[in-house]
Image: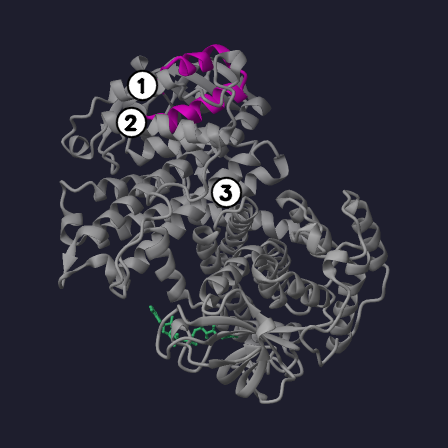
Amino acid sequence: MTTSATPGRATRGAATSAHEPDSSWRERLGALLDDFRRRPRPATSHERFAAAVAWQSELVDAGLAAPGWPEAVGGLGLDLTDQLDYYRMMTAAGAPKHPCSLSFIVAPTLIVHGTDAQRQRYLEPLLRADEFWCQGFSEPGAGSDLASLSTRAVREGDHYRVTGQKIWTTMADRADWMFALVRTGEPGRGTSGVTYLLIAMDSPGVEVRPLRDAAGGRHFAEVFFDDVVVPVANRVGDEGGGWSIMRTSLGHERATAFLADEFKYRTTVDKVVRLAIAQGYRDDALVRQRIAELETDVATIATNSARALGAVLRGEDPGSVASINRLVKSEFEQRMHRLALRLTGPGAVLGGRSFGAVDGGRWTHGYMMTRASTIGAGTAEIQRNTIAESVLGLPSHRGEGRRAPAVAPGRPLAAPDPDEAVVRETVADMVAALVAPDRLVSGEVDRAQTWMSLVDFGLPGLAAAQAWGGGGAPLGLLCAAVEEAAYHLAPVPLVPTISALALLTEAGAQEHARRLIDGERAVVVVATDDAGWRIGASADPAGLVTIAEGVLSGTVGRVVGAPDADVLVVLAREADSGELVIAVVEQADVQLIPEEPLDLTASAAQVNLDGVTGTVVASGDTARRASVYAHRVALLMIAADSVGVAARAVAMAVDWAGQREQFGRPIGEFQAVSHRCADMLVDTESARNQVQAAAAVESDPDNAEPAVLLAAAQALSAAVRVTESCIQVHGGIGFTWEHPAHLLLRRALSNEACCARPEALRDQAAEHVISRIESA
Ligand SMILES: Cc1cc2nc3c(=O)[nH]c(=O)nc-3n(C[C@H](O)[C@H](O)[C@H](O)COP(=O)(O)OP(=O)(O)OC[C@H]3O[C@@H](n4cnc5c(N)ncnc54)[C@H](O)[C@@H]3O)c2cc1C
């Protein structure tokens, strides 16, 4: 790396870089990484740093650097999918990252706003890590409120004279260049007189004074400018146009910088799980909950990252998704390190550099460092302001009015694909027309008519095989339909019927499955506990009703949907052999004792099966396989229902926060309210992504089980949190019977209890995670 660089110095232009556009990158990168794997690993941090710098040059020479940059400026110009593959390959090989991450904030800015001369001068040395960059935005008097920056640049002919101070400038002591925001316009707060300059750090008048951070390191510094001369040629964009250019920088920081996070976090979470095992916490119930939550976080970040990058590549502003992503990521980093530090047990009394510190003190150091995760690059509070004001369209907390929301609050942030959009719109319109919340409270909704409209549309058989009369759609579409029906609180046994249908189709019971596809309502009759359906161990399916020569005996309580069902699909135990059996029973033959449901949009009953004749449709292994699959589908559908309920709660809360006034202002201006709404959105959006992602892997046996467990746990818990918040945001009105907020909470609570508790699901998911690590 050079320590001195002169603006305009001739270097080999990135645009004329060694490689020609081609599609052989995958083989070439694979070969380079094979070679990399055979190399000895650097032992010290100094060696690691030198190796990382050398690796960048190697990538540039091989024409394999910058997968997402256009080829014209030295990149590979790969599309999103290929970029993800590129990073997967790099991460799997343990290849070092670029040693100066800030370079990838200035680079997109130069690509979009720089001159040809700037691109030629700066991009290749940046990519090679020959030159390092630092970001000079924050000042002692301008942190979150960057528009208050006061470092002045006064133009004199072909140069500016810069005077002022930057602070918390990461890598300032190592950087060759700073991309800085300076004030060229009138002094005072404002964005119009802000200009974007590239300042050589070895310019006379630049003084760097390293600052020690809370973790004990010296990664950032104060930078003083005393009449520093900066050529006008080093200005990016127009004078006074720096603010919008800076927004491009931050937009890219929040979007592209996340691409590799999925892989980085995956690796670190695995290390935390290994730590838990090594430290004897494998079976600690609390630790297992936290492990499952970390897994959920990683999955959330992965889907959000892909979406944000997808938006960038389509030329769209990734802003709304990216703010959510940044908040999730920063708080996840803290949670992960808090758990890791906890897992070091009594070892946590030692400092990170102490002899005997667990894992060389990395978790102590990581914990201290991640206190900065919710401060640097925009605090968590500022992220919540952005989500509330720019994504949800709530009024500005600074009294600066309102913007239109990015999407209607509660709706998916990522535009659904055309099929999903049609399903969502159709189901939503249909149910909304029939189910008004006030009529729900007074019991005036025509449930039969609502059900028949859904059947006319193709539910509940949307995802059933076409050969059986179903729609043949992927499970994700079915989830979207269930979500929309729940959004409008459809008071019909859609989830119970879909679960029963899954049981029948997987058991091969075509004739009975067809009845449900044609519109009969059904329910699975099986005792449940916190862990889910009590189908028990293979030899002794405890807790089941019994069946002998086709005649059932036993009672199952709290069967949600039973009073509405035409058909009951019973999971029973063969009295002699103990084998699991699936039997179909007509509701008319059964004695039902109605129970009062917590969820006013559902029904519940105790089902007495004594002496009832059932048609056995499957037994033994077939029945077991079918019940395992159907339980997963049931969880997924309940989760989708919960997402719909949560989404409605977001919409209602945001609507109220924008219109209800107190103290002469809409309550949405108060951050206690707007930040709550922001958290509701993040919770709901994350849950929706998890459910969709889990639906997408349903056919992959290795991943389906943990994905569904985690998605369901996430959605069930999120819906309760979000609907509780909805009542809180509404104040007294939200606590009245007539207001629909309690209907949402009731449905969310019932969902959380009716099939399996989120804690039990997380525990099961944690077992998958721990076993995977143990067997690796
Ligand atoms: C490790 C680290 C590295 C950094 N690296 C760089 C760098 O390389 N370059 C650079 O330019 N800067 C850098 N920064 C600075 C960083 O951008 C600022 O610290 C950040 O923007 C917050 O500004 P502040 O520190 O002045 O805090 P303040 O803005 O003073 O915030 C203090 C508290 O008030 C809250 N707050 C402030 N305004 C509001 C509001 N409107 N609504 C609600 N709450 C509010 C904040 O959330 C926070 O909790 C770095 C910071 C850290 C910690």
Among the two numbered marks 1 and 3 on one chain, the one whose residue lies closer to the N terminus? 1
Q: Which of 240 and 105 is in front in this view?
A: 240
Q: Residue 431 carries which label?
A: 2
Magenta-highlighted stretch: main secondary structure? helix
Residue corresponding to mark 1: 453
Q: What element carries label 2?
A: helix
Q: Quadrant of residue 204?
A: bottom right
Quick check: 393 above or below 215?
A: above
- Between circles 1 and 3, the one closer to the viewer is 1
Whether tag 3 and tag 2 are in contact, CB under 8 A, the answer is no
Residue 483 seen from this side: yes
Is 235 drawn above or below residue 627 in the view shown?
Answer: below
Q: Residue at x 75, y 64 (%)?
A: 56
Residue extending furthest toward the front: 157
Write down the region rendered in magenta. Answer: 493-521
Q: What amino acid is found at the position of numbered circle 1 in the picture?
A: Ser
Query: Is label 1 within 8 A of ligand 1 (CB to nearest ligand atom)?
Result: no
CA separation in Å, label 1 and label 3: 31 Å
Q: In this view, does 132 lie above or below 412?
A: below
Separation of residues labelled 3 and 2 (CA atoms): 29 Å
Q: Residue 709 carries which label?
A: 3
Examine the rendering and report whether any part of residue 545 can be seen. Answer: no
Q: Where is residue 698 in the image (x, y as percent from the top left)?
A: 56, 33
Per the model, the C-alpha gap separating discs 1 and 2 is 8 Å
Q: Residue at the location (65% across, 61% down)?
A: 116
